[in-house]
Image: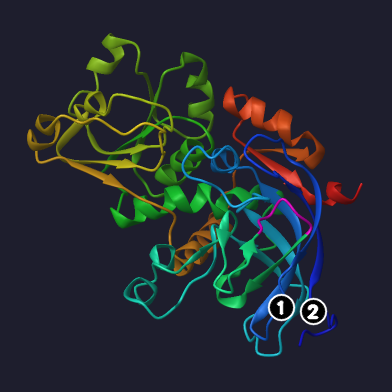
Amino acid sequence: MLEEKTISRIPSKGYAAQNEHTNLAPWDFERRTPGENDVLIDILYCGVCHSDLHAIKNDWFSGVFPMVPGHEIVGKIASVGNQVSRFKTGDLVGVGVMVDACLECENCHNHQEQFCATGVQTYNHIGRDGLPVYGGYSNNIVVREEFVLNVSEKLSLAAVAPLLCAGITTYSPLRHWKVGKGHKLAVLGLGGLGHMAVKFGVAFGAEVTVLSTSESKREAAKALGAHNFVVTQDEAQLSTVKSSFDFILDTVSAKHDIDVYLSLLKANGVHICVGIPLEPLSVSPFSIVGGNKVLAGSGAGGLAQTQEMLDYCAENNIVSDIELIDIKNIDTAFERMLKGDVRYRFVIDMNTINQ
């Protein structure tokens, strides 16, 4: 039973793709019946992640349709189940890339719920009750309380939304590898993920260099706090940073030559992939064994670390740089995103879904 709203199924409005060949369009649907440990959230803002488009188009694997994307959610709690202890009606909260897990396996006990074998992603997935789950391109969402995060009133709520994916995806590996003072960090790519990597790297005390194919991004990188900028297509510039970085955080989702970037690492350096190209990576073993180098990957962080990141951002006034859009303009936003024409993340004002 929910406080204030005793509703079995929750009527919802969203934008959905009916299959991989259709654009997003308005879709009325119902959320699952809220349980005693659930919260009902009225969604205020939802970030637009490149993975939303990959999912809609079946770029990685067959999707669950109709599909309502969105996993960078900020909203306000409308009602809570009678066993909910951490939240109350009216609280500002966030929901990231997952909405459920077993909470009993080794990964869950290690605060890595994102790797739970029976975990449930925020959209394009089947819930533990056997029903499809729908994401944040909608006016509300029902979520188990353990997967709801506190959001500070100190920051712009719209600009907080991308922290739930782009933020934690870059914060997590930097914390895992203990990047900080005395380290030279290169951020490969300056987009939705890259701009957050620069902000966190600088905040943690590292010397940050942006590696980009585009000279036009130099001033933008410096404005974000980057100490250096290198155009990777300029051999002269690239040669000046050979064997110079302790870490490279690779945010690129397009095909690129990993061997080139491994050559920029010092001995024992670490190249961390957070971008997901559609084609498999090709790496020469000599690029790794020559210098004891590490090629690593990182997904989004667990619940505790995501809350830690949100708290850190509130304390240090860190948010994403965004462009706020009407949901009716989502297809145009996707087109611009593919062209790199956004600095650096689109966020949907979900109030526009009712207009």
Q: Residues within 10 Å of mark 1 (few under 14, many from 20)?
A: many
Residue hosting label 2: 8
- Name the residue at 76% across, 38% down: 325
From the viewer's perspective, is residue 47 above or below residue 186? below
Residue hosting label 1: 34
Residue type, label 2: Ser
Please state the horizontal and vertical placement of residue 330, each as a whole percent of the image. 73, 36
Is residue 98 rendered magenta in the image?
A: no
- Name the residue at 72% across, 28% down: 332
Instruction: Say which element carries label 1.
Output: loop
In the rendered image, is residue 151 in sight?
A: no
Q: Is residue 319 left or right of residue 271?
A: right
From the viewer's perspective, is residue 72 above or below residue 196? below
- Name the residue at 65% across, 26% down: 335
Q: CA distance from mark 2 to mark 1?
A: 7 Å
- Name the residue at 54% across, 30% down: 223
- Total numbered labels placed on residues in the image: 2
- Could you tell me if the residues under marks 2 and 1 are in contact, i.e. CB atoms within 8 Å? no
Q: Is residue 39 left or right of residue 307?
A: right
Instruction: Say which element carries label 2.
Output: loop
Q: Is residue 267 left or right of residue 113?
A: left
- Main SS type for the magenta part? loop
Please state the horizontal and vertical placement of residue 52, each as a whole percent of the image. 59, 43
Q: Which residues are magenta?
A: 134-139
Please state the horizontal and vertical placement of residue 125, each as a whole percent of the image. 55, 58
From the viewer's perspective, is residue 347 above or below residue 178? above
